[in-house]
Image: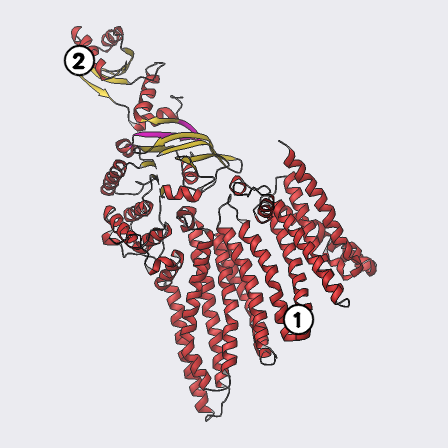
Amino acid sequence: MANPMKKEWSDWVNPVLIKEIRQHFHNFGILSVMGALLAGELVLLAVMQYRASDFRGSFTDSGSIMFGFLVGGMVLAAYFICSMGAMIRFTTERRNRELDFSFQTTLSPNRIVWGKLAGTLVMTVFIFALCLPFMVIAYFLRGIEMGSMLLISLATLPPICIASQLGILIGSVGRRWLVSLFFVLSFFAAQPLVIFTVLLFTRVGGVDSPVGALLLWYGIGGIILELLYALSVAAVGSRFSNRMLPVRISLIGVIALSPLIGLGIGLIADPAILLESMLGMLVIAASCIAAFCATLAAFERQDPGDRVLRKRPHNPIGHFAHFLVSSGAWGGVVLAYLMMLFAGATAAVFFLLNPSDGADLVLWVSGGTYFLFYANVAILLARRWKILAGWGWWAVTLIAFIVLPLLFGTGVAMIEREYVPYCFLTAPFCLVKPELGWFGPLLAVISLAVTGGVMLKRRKQP
Amino acid sequence: MEIKVRNLTRSFGATKAVDDISFDFASGNVFGFIGPNGAGKTTTIKIMTTLDDPDGGDVFYDGVSVVNYPEEVRRLVGYMPDSLPDFRDIQVWEYLDFFARGFGLRGKARTRTLAEIEEFTNLGGIRCKYLSALSKGMKQRVSLARSLIHNPGVLIMDEPAAGLDPRARLELRSLLRVLSGQGKAILLSSHILSELQDICDGAIIIEKGKLLSAGTLTQLMAKASGVAAGTADAAPAVTLVIQCAKTEEARLKLLEHPAVKEVAIRGEGELQAFLAGGDEVVPPVMATLFAAGLPVMGFARKSMGLEELFMKITTGEVQ
C-alpha cells in the first residue's frame, strides 16, 4: 500500500521558495522588468550592429562596451526584481500580522528568510540566463576576454545578494515608509556605487591575483550578507523568542571568517605578509563586531523571557554559552567584552610579530571600546528610567558623549587647537592623538563595573 | 480539547486592552466571543492564536502554553481572520498549497487534504482565481479553508459572518455545525448576535478589556433571568408575556402563586411575569388565572435572546 506521506520532489523544497517563484511569475511588475531587459538587450544589439557597420568593422571595443551595458542592465533588473520586489512583497505580508504568512504556519523564521533569499537567487539566475546569449555575442564582437567576463559576472553576485537580503530585512520590518526611503536613498547611493564598481573593474585587469581579489570581494560580501541575514531572521522572530541567537552566532562567524579577507588582501598586496594581513583583519573585525554587538545589546530587552530561559542547558559551560548568545542585553554586553579582549590579545600577538605596525591596530581596539561604554550607559539608563526604550537611551548617550563634545571641541578649536583632542575624551575622535588611546578602555572597564554591579544586585533581589 | 485562558493581560501604552481575563471552553462546543467595539476581543484572539504576546497570563490548549510553545499551538489552532490578503500574484490553490506545505503536509496526503478542503468549502470553481479578484464571501471561504488545512482541534474565527450575504451566512452556519459535530472547539467573535444565538452553545462577554460573563447560553440566560426576577440563585427561569384585559387583577392573582417572582405591567392589557423554575411551572401558573375567570386573550413563553442578554450584561444589570 502506498504511503500517503511519501515525499514528492517538491516536498524537499522550502515552501516559501515555491510560493515566491509562483508569485514572481504571476507578478506583472516583475514580468515587465524582464521584458524591458530583453527589449533593452535587443536595442543594444541593434546599436552595436549599426556602430560596427559605421566604423566598417574597425570598432574593436564593441564587445567590452556591450558587455558593460549588459552587466549594468543585469544589475539594474536585479535591483528592481530581487531587491525592491522582495522588499515590497515582504512588507505587504508583514504589514498586517493577521495576514502574515510567517505567523500562520509552523515555518521557522530561518526557513522563511532562507526561502525569500533563495527566491531572489532563482530570479538572479533567470536574469543572468536572459543576458547570457547577448554576453556570448559581446565576446564575439571582441574587446573583452572570456576570463574577465567570467570574473566580472561572478563579481556581480555578492552585491545582488546583499541588495536582495537588505530588501528582505527592510521588508521584514513591515513599514511602507521604509520601502520609500530605501528607494529614494538607493538613487543617491547609485552614483558612488557605480563609480566604485567601475574603478574596481578597471583595476581588476591590473591585479596580479584575480582570485585574491575575488576572495576579498566574496569575503566582504559574505560577511555583510551573513549579518543582514541574521538580522532578518531576528526581525521575523516573535518578541519573546530567542531572536538574538542567530545574530550573535553570525557575529562570531564574522570574526571567524575575517582572516579570509586578510588572506585576499595579502594575496593581492604581498604574499609575504599573509599572516600579518590575516591577523590584522582579525583584530579589525573583532573590534568592529564587539562594538556592533554591544550596540545591539543596548537596543534589546534587558532580561531574557521564560521562553529563552527554558532552553538554557544545566551544565555550567552550556549555561554560560547560552547566556552569551541568547537574547538579553547583559549577555550581549559580556560577549562584546569577550570579543574585545580577543581583539586586544590578537593585536598583542601582531605587535610581537610586527612592532612597527602594531600601534595602528591598538587604535582600532581602543576605538571599539567606546561603543562598549555607550552601550553600558544606555542599558543602565534604560534600567533606571523606563520613559525611553533602549535605542532611545542609546541615542541620548551618543548625544551626550559625542555630539556635545563635538560642539564644545569646535568652540575650543577656535581658541586653542592643541587642547581639542582632550575635549573628545568620551568619543573615539580623541584617537587623533594616539597617546589618548588608553581612555576608551578605561571608560569601558569603569562602565562595565558599574553596570555589572547594578545588574547583579538587581538579579539577587527576590 | 480543553482550552483555558488564564489571567490574560495586554496593554498598549496606558490603555489596558485586555485586563485579567480568564475563561474556559472545550471541544464540541461553539462559543461566541461577544463585546462592543474596542472591548478587547481581537486582542484576546490574537494572543490566543500566537499573533501577539501577552504582558501577563497565558492560554493553554490541553496544557500547551501559547507563551512557551507558540509553534506547537499553531498546529492545534486554526485561525480565521476577518480578512484575506489582496495579493494580485497568488491564486487560491497556490495560497492553500503554501499553507499545506507550511504545516508539513507532504505528497499525496497534501493533495488529498487540499481536494477535501476545497470540496468542503466549495472552492472548486474559484481555485484558479487570484486573491485580489475574490468577493467577500469567497474570501471568507478561502480563509476558512486555510484555517482547516492542518485539521486543528480548535477553530478561532474573528467576525466570520461580517459582510456576508444571507445565503453565504446560511452556508457558513451549516459549515460550522458540521465542524462542531466533528468535535472541534470553535470560538467565534461577532457583532451579529442573532447569528450567534442559532449556532452557539455558550458565550464569553467582555467589555473594556474585562470579562463580564462566561458560560453556556442556558447558564447565562438563567443567570440573567434570575437576576431580573430577583432570585438569588441562578436556576432556569421563564418569562411569560400574558395578554389580559384586567391587568391589575391578573397581576395580583399571579403574585399569589409561589412560582411567580415578579410581575410587571408592560402596557395596556399586557403583563410580564417572571417565574422561578423551568417550563413545568407554566401550566399551574396559567391555571391560576383561568380558575379566577380572568379574561386571558393569549400568552407566550418569552425566551431571552442573546441580544437582550448581551444588553443586560453590558449595561451592568448582570454582575
Q: Position of residue A321 (x, y in %)?
A: 59, 48
Bounds of the magenta segment:
B200-212
Q: Pinpoint the chain carrying mark 2.
A: B
Q: Which mark is residue B296?
A: 2
- Other residues around mark 1 within 10 Å, as few (<14) / some (14–19) / many (≥20): some
Image location of residue A365, percent across then percent down: 71, 58
Answer whether residue B208 is magenta in the image. Answer: yes
Q: Residue at x 67, y 46 (%)?
A: A376
Amino acid type for the residue under numbered disc 2: Val
Q: Is residue B119 left or right of residue A444?
A: left
At a point 34% along the width and 60% down the height, the residue shown is: A10
A461 in relation to B115, above or below: above
Q: Nearer the viewer, mark 2 or mark 1?
A: 1
Q: CA distance from mark 2 to mark 1?
A: 110 Å
Image x and y of residue B75, in percent: 38, 44
Residue A440 or residue A429, whichever sits in front: A440
* Any part of residue B120 in sight: yes
- The structure residue drawn at horizontal position 53% and vertical position 64%, both measured from the top left corner, is A186
Q: Is residue A271 left or right of residue A132?
A: right
Q: Which quadrant of the figure has residue B66?
A: top left
Q: Which residue is mark 1?
A: A274
Marks counted in the figure total 2
Is residue A313 positioned above or below B263 on the image?
A: below
Vertical order, B4 against A196 (above or below):
above
Q: Give, as a three-letter code, the residue at label 1.
A: Leu
